[in-house]
Amino acid sequence: MKPTIRLRTSVQLFSLFTLFCSSILFAQDVQLDFDYFKNEVQPIFLSKREGNVRCIQCHTRSSGFRIQPLEDHQLFWTDEQSRMNFDSAASFSLAGEDPLRSRFLTHPLAYDAGGDPFHGGGKHFDSQFDPEWRIMADWVAGAKTRREPSRVAVRIIQTNAAGDDSTIIDPETNQVVGHISDIEIPHGVVGAPDGSQIYITNEVMHSLDIVDARTLRVKRRIPLSGRPNNLGVTSDGSKVYVAIMEMPGSVDIIDVASMTNVKTLPVNGAIHNVYVTPDSRYAVAGSIQTRTINVIDTSTDELVWELEMSSGIRPMTFDTNADGSTKNIFVQLSGFHGFAVVDFASRKEGCACRAPCGAGRGGAS
Ligand code: HEC
């Protein structure tokens, strides 16, 4: 029982974009798009590429290209700051023209790949197929939205809580095929249902980190109300529920479209795991400390019922009725070598199933 439960919580299986079609249109009267710059291009100034310094470390003062500094604890720019960054980047870009005529694109691009001979900040991109360089080039070409993927692949992601990375595994070959770096003490991971991005909770910065599946780099860090543990996403991809592992207890609710933390919902006890039910109508959050299951209605984002159990709430999973609604919650309890069953409709604890002797200590995380 134990290995199965551990896999459910720390490893998630989902689709991931890997390849993107690439054809840049050359057009007259191309306008540079502000929202695309703000949400897609700006994260590149903050991301850590191996062997390079982040663009922001130098460009708050170096050269004519100016990036606005971020104050302590500020994880992203305000709209006003983004406008200033936009204007500065635009002044080194020729919209709609051959990308190799824009200093914004040639300066960080390797000379062999078409870049110019020298950049005081080093070369950040080896190829015009580098996904981050392509995002910048698409902006200069007038893109307003991110590209549609040309291929989607299934991957397993393992967060490494004693490290600063998460490992990406191809389940067909069982080989490690990539890493998501720059998140220290990553805890929970779930994928957007369309595979476009990956959500990882960051225990050091107390943030929900959105990782772009094209670049495998952090696209946005969203401040949370406390130290996070696991998380769940609705099947339409619109909301992410994050367990906050601090008393008296709360679940943070993230609106994916606006990339903002829209609500900190008080619940009963510090939350270790939160799951969205298969029909996405409820988010179910469990507390080890108060032994309580908290059920949140996802249409109102209010707590609708809670149930105290005999021991701390560990991982949970669900089965469904014929209409897709939730039938039972299967709950692992601290110190119990088995699992309890809660009938969802009557909100009552039913039978408990004990694992055979020697099946291991209860309380997997
Ligand atoms: C280690 C510091 C450093 C880093 C990191 C760095 N740069 Fe630079 N950058 C410079 C310096 C110094 C110059 C001025 C000298 C030159 O033109 O190379 C410069 C110049 C530029 C220019 C031309 C500005 C002008 O006045 O002509 C652009 C555009 C630019 N950098 C973009 C970037 C981008 C985009 C990144 C990140 C992908 C980046 N830089 C990362 C130091 C840095």
Image: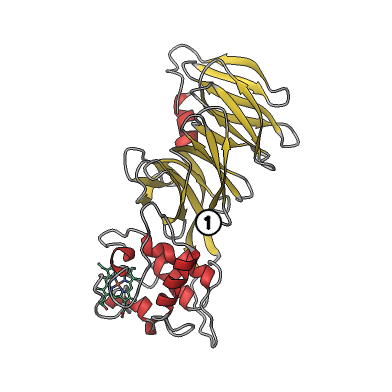
Q: Residue furthest right?
A: 323
Q: Which residue is mark 1?
A: 196
Q: Residue furthest top?
A: 357
Left or right of 323 in this view: 136 = left
Residue 42 in view? yes
Q: Secondary structure at mark 1?
A: loop
Residue 102 at x, y percent in the picture: 39, 82
From this view, report whether residue 183 is shown above or below residue 116.
above
* Quarter occupied by residue 284: top right
From this view, report whether residue 222 is shown above or below residue 345.
below
From this view, report whether residue 138 is shown above or below residue 360.
below
Ligand 1 sits in which quadrant? bottom left
Residue 155 in view? no
Residue 108 at x, y percent in the picture: 32, 73
| Residue closest to the eye, 174 or 45 | 45
Left or right of 277 in this view: 362 = left
| Residue closest to the eye, 320 or 304 | 304
- Residue drawn at (52%, 60%) of the image: 151
